[in-house]
Amino acid sequence: MKFADIGLSDELLRAIDEAGYNEATPIQAGVIPSVLMMRDIIGIAQTGTGKTASFVLPMIDILAHGRARALMPRSLILAPTRELAAQVAENFEKYGKYHKLSMALLIGGVQMGDQVKALEKGVDVLIATPGRLMDLFERGKILLTGCNLLVIDEADRMLDMGFIPDIENICTKLPATRQTLLFSATMPAPIKRLADKFLSNPKTIEVARPASRNENIEQFLVKTSERNKRDTLRDLIEAEDIATAIIFCNRKTTVRELAKSLQRYGYKAGEIHGDMDQSSRIAELDRFKNGTINILVASDVAARGLDVKGVSHVFNFDAPWHPDDYVHRIGRTGRAGAKGRAFTLVSSSDDEAIDNIQKLTGYKIPVHGGAAVATGAESPADDEEKSGSKRARPARGGRGKGAAKAEKAPARPAEAPAARPAKSTRGDRKPAPSARRDDQDGPDDGWNGPMPDFLSVGFGN
């Protein structure tokens, strides 16, 4: 269905056209007309389906009628994390540029005084994480009695992060008669109860089975061993025609070590994880966006919501411990109709994790036969890295296929093993499900401020 046939305003259609879109995705075609008819909506859609635009676009036209009053926003969008809230804000800026609408973004890590000033002027739409919103409400800095439209985005993620009590509390602060839109990739029982309690005769729109296979993404398992994962990864990188790639690790320490390893081998690699401050994350993402680096090693802080155009490959250096994380990780490629490839490195210890992923997705991931399965001793260069040696390597420019093997540094001296640190990535093992490792990113490990302009977020979000 074309956007011109959905009933959106000419100003909005102009902004959509300038962004390069004319065809609505299934979730957009299903949701937008019903929102314009003032229906409550339950939208069930996985990442990459255009979910965000399905509520942003009709909201812009709805808000075009009326005027904001000080401290009383007319609509509210709740998002579970800072980066998701900031990306919704970018959608409003992009597609609302021909409407005179005001917006406030309430997320942690930003000076509260600046947010209060924005609220005092009166805003049409308030985009917030639950924690910061409740903080400002309890300080008497905001009134919600004028909100006639509520969006709860990524409700299942809200559940995972323990925000459902906050959501229920916030709902009681809004007018009883309002329009409510709830979006979720899955519909567990607590989310169903939330919808039953706060939505009025909602229309349910489901565009795909939750966590189903994205046909635009070719998925592969690559068998290896724990001690040879770096060799296997480099072989894959050399064999694939990579434009830009994200490599996911389970732990922040692994992210740091792997990024340094790839840099030593001449790859243009960067890193992003929860121990980095806001300015460092923005700088690294900027380098990834502008092509200074084309490989980004990341923890799961980057898996949900991050939409960088043109990611051709995703590599799971570590098989994710939770199957939902697998879906969100590989969803960084194959977005908005583009093709992508996803590789997951697995050893015998990953059998249970892979079984759970395949049960969730209903798809048996094929084993990739194009990359060698490393079974022997570690490469001299990797052993050298773990020993802490500072042996210099020649500078390299572009990377050709097969170049990594030819450019490995010579073996270290025989006495080097004594210098090897006690802690090594090869000793990493899956922690107990009930405990979170100190070096694993937490669920709200998001941005400390608004997202930068270079993160292009459109209908593929």
Image: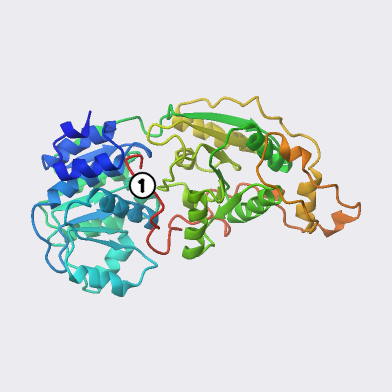
For the residue pair 122 and 13, the one nearer the viewer reads as 13
Left or right of 302 on screen, residue 227: right
For the residue pair 65 and 82, the one nearer the viewer reads as 65
Identity of the residue drawn at 8% across and 56% down: 66
Hey, what amino acid is under mark 1?
Answer: Val
Q: Where is residue 443 in the image (x, y as percent from the top left)?
A: 45, 54
For the residue pair 196 and 122, the one nearer the viewer reads as 122
Identity of the residue drawn at 68% across and 48% down: 266
Residue 36 visible, this orientation: yes
Q: Please tell me in which quadrant of the rendered image residue 173 appears.
A: bottom left
Identity of the residue drawn at 61% across and 42% down: 317
Q: Which residue lies furthest to the right in this view?
A: 414
Left or right of 301 on screen, residue 106: left
For label 1, the SS is: loop
Q: Please tell me in which quadrant of the rendered image residue 21 appears.
A: top left
For the residue pair 143 and 232, the one nearer the viewer reads as 232
Q: Position of residue 163 (x, y in %)?
A: 34, 56
**Which quadrant is home to the N terminus?**
top left
- How packed mark 1 is, by other alpha carbons closer than 10 Å (few <14, some 14-19, many 20 or more), is many
Q: Where is residue 323 in the image (x, y as percent from the top left)?
A: 49, 39
Residue at which label 1 appears = 457
Residue 39 visible, this orientation: no
Q: Position of residue 175 (x, y in %)?
A: 12, 57
